[in-house]
């Protein structure tokens, strides 16, 4: 078997960038779709529909964030064994991941559909948008298996050094998604159902394309449903690494849910403004998260190959990449924010425009904190210490909950504008301390006499 991109050899900066570019492209196209999606909703379905989708976002963060984090975590032992060139173990890793993802898709889908109504009531979803929100949320939760299929299949390909193919398939699925959005809205008049259905269908298509590509290509290790490769210890190992990464996203998402509760108390204008601003913000910060994802795979492969110095180089080079991107993003926000907001919201009230402007302007000066957090957190995860990384999720929970409390007390929408920055800052401090402790205690980082 031959890796498509061996991250344990060659220039550290070059390898990270080569692996990151397709991931960044995926993030940009994904967010471009979210941007267009919101544009379609606002122009064809109205501001109330935008608010409904915005209300669902923290639940999306809670569940689908858990799925994404877990699937990345499931691929960490796979990446480490690939780095060690232990291909018999790779087969065990793959089968264990398939088994766990299958069970996870069933359990999560059933639990979330049953509790949808209660969750939206808990969030104090305004009555004006409650019916729209519950329709959108139920369909989205029904599509959890499709999301798991895409995320795990993409993580497996990336573990082998192939970040290009998931990107190509994602682009195809996003084009299909936009086509289905317009088809369901304009031809079948399905309203807000259109957006959720189109997303679920396109995710399933992308996941199937990943899986078919893997099966068809000869260079990948193939797995058969044989008890010879069914390894209980492997299942426990990937759960031990994967689920903490998922819970880290979910713990952080609880803070987002608390924040959404506070936003909902401020009314529909605040909900729509924050939802629109977040879509624009993610257009700039998701590439940072992609570099972080690359760092997790890069670290795992190099740790498996005992290339410790390359891990340290990777952290330095990753931080440089994030710093440059954060400055470039700030410049773009300053130059084009008014056009982006107008494009996103269409013709709307001055109040919604002003609130969106305030949120976006405030957060853009703190992008570098988010970028550094992605490097430190994913390095910890790539080393296999995902339980420790959960502490960063707790930091984000504390940050968003604190800002929400201030919002309810007296600061109002201004506190909401600083919630993510506080969350990122606390989490970055925690991850910095954790990484230092790991480096000091892990014998692999100790110099050999």
Image (tube, helix red, strand yellow):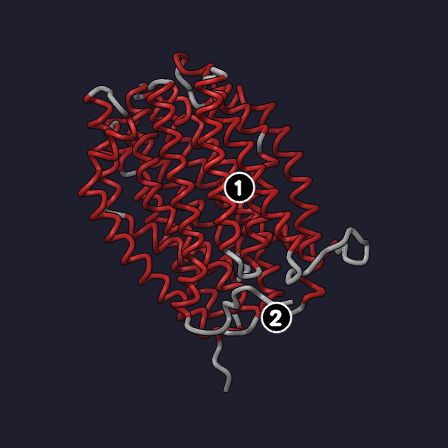
Instruction: Please name the residue shown 44% across and 54% down the image.
Output: 22
User: Mark 2 or mark 1, which is nearer the start of the sequence?
Assistant: 1
Question: Circle 1: is it few (<14), some (14-19), or many (20+) Cα within 10 Å?
Answer: many
Q: Secondary structure at mark 1?
A: helix
Q: Secondary structure at mark 2?
A: helix
- CB under 8 Å between discs 1 and 2: no
The residue at the point 55 percent across, 64 percent down is: 4
Nearer to us of marks 1 and 2 is 2
**x and y percent of residue 372 in the render?**
35, 56
219 with respect to 183 (left or right) = right
Rendered position, 416 above or below 164? above
The residue beneath circle 2 is 84
Q: Residue furthest bottom?
A: 449
**Cα–Cα span, label 1 and label 2:** 28 Å
Whether 396 is drawn above or below 81: the answer is above
Query: Which residue is denoted by mark 1 in the rendering?
Result: 66
Quarter the N terminus occupies? bottom right
From the viewer's perspective, is 241 left or right of 445?
Answer: right
The image position of residue 276, as x and y in percent, is 32, 30
Which residue: 48% across, 53% down? 389
- Closer-to-camera residue (115/109): 109
The x and y percentages for residue 158 are 54, 56
Residue 184 vs residue 115, the one in the foreground: 184
Q: Residues within 10 Å of mark 2 (few under 14, many from 20)?
A: some
Measured as percent of width and height from the top left, residue 266 is found at 30, 21
């Amino acid at each position: 078997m031959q890796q498509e991109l061996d991250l344990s050899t060659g220039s550290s900066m070059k390898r990270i960038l080569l692996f990151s570019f397709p991931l960044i492209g995926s993030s940009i196209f994904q967010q471009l779709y979210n941007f267009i999606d919101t544009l379609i909703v606002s122009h064809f379905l109205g501001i109330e529909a935008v608010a409904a989708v915005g209300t669902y976002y923290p639940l999306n963060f809670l569940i689908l964030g858990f799925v994404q984090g877990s699937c990345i975590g499931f691929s960490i032992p796979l990446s480490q064994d690939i780095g060690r060139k232990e291909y018999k173990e790779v087969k065990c890793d793959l089968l264990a991941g398939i088994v766990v993802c299958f069970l996870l898709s069933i359990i999560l889908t059933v639990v979330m559909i049953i509790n949808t109504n209660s969750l939206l009531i808990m969030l104090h979803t305004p009555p004006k948008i409650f019916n729209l929100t519950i329709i959108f949320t139920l369909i989205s939760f029904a599509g959890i298996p499709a999301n798991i299929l895409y995320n795990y299949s993409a993580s497996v390909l990336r573990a082998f050094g192939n970040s290009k193919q998931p990107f190509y398939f994602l682009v195809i699925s996003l084009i299909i998604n936009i086509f289905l959005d317009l088809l369901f809205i304009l031809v079948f008049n399905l309203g807000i159902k259109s957006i959720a259905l189109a997303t679920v269908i396109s995710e399933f298509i992308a996941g199937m394309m990943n899986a078919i590509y893997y099966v068809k290509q000869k260079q990948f290790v193939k797995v058969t449903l044989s008890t010879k490769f069914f390894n209980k210890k492997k299942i426990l190992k990937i759960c031990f690494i994967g689920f903490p990464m998922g819970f880290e996203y979910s713990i952080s998402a609880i803070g987002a849910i608390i924040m959404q509760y506070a936003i909902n108390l401020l009314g529909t204008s605040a909900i729509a403004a924050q939802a629109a601003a977040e879509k624009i913000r993610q257009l700039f910060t998701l590439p940072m998260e992609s570099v972080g994802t690359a760092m997790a795979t890069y670290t795992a492969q190099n740790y498996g190959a005992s290339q410790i110095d390359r891990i340290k180089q990777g952290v330095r080079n990753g931080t440089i990449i994030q710093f440059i991107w954060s400055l470039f993003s700030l410049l773009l926000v300053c130059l084009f924010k008014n056009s982006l907001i107008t494009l996103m919201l269409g013709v709307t009230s001055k109040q919604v425009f002003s609130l969106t402007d305030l949120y976006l302007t405030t957060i853009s000066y703190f992008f570098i904190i988010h970028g550094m957090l992605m490097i430190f957190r994913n390095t910890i995860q790539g080393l296999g210490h995902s339980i420790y990384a959960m502490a960063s999720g707790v930091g984000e929970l504390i940050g968003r909950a604190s800002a929400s409390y201030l919002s309810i007390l007296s600061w109002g929408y201004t506190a909401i504008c600083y919630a993510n920055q506080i969350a990122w800052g606390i989490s970055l401090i925690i991850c910095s301390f954790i990484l230092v402790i790991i480096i000091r205690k892990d014998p692999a980082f100790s110099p050999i006499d």
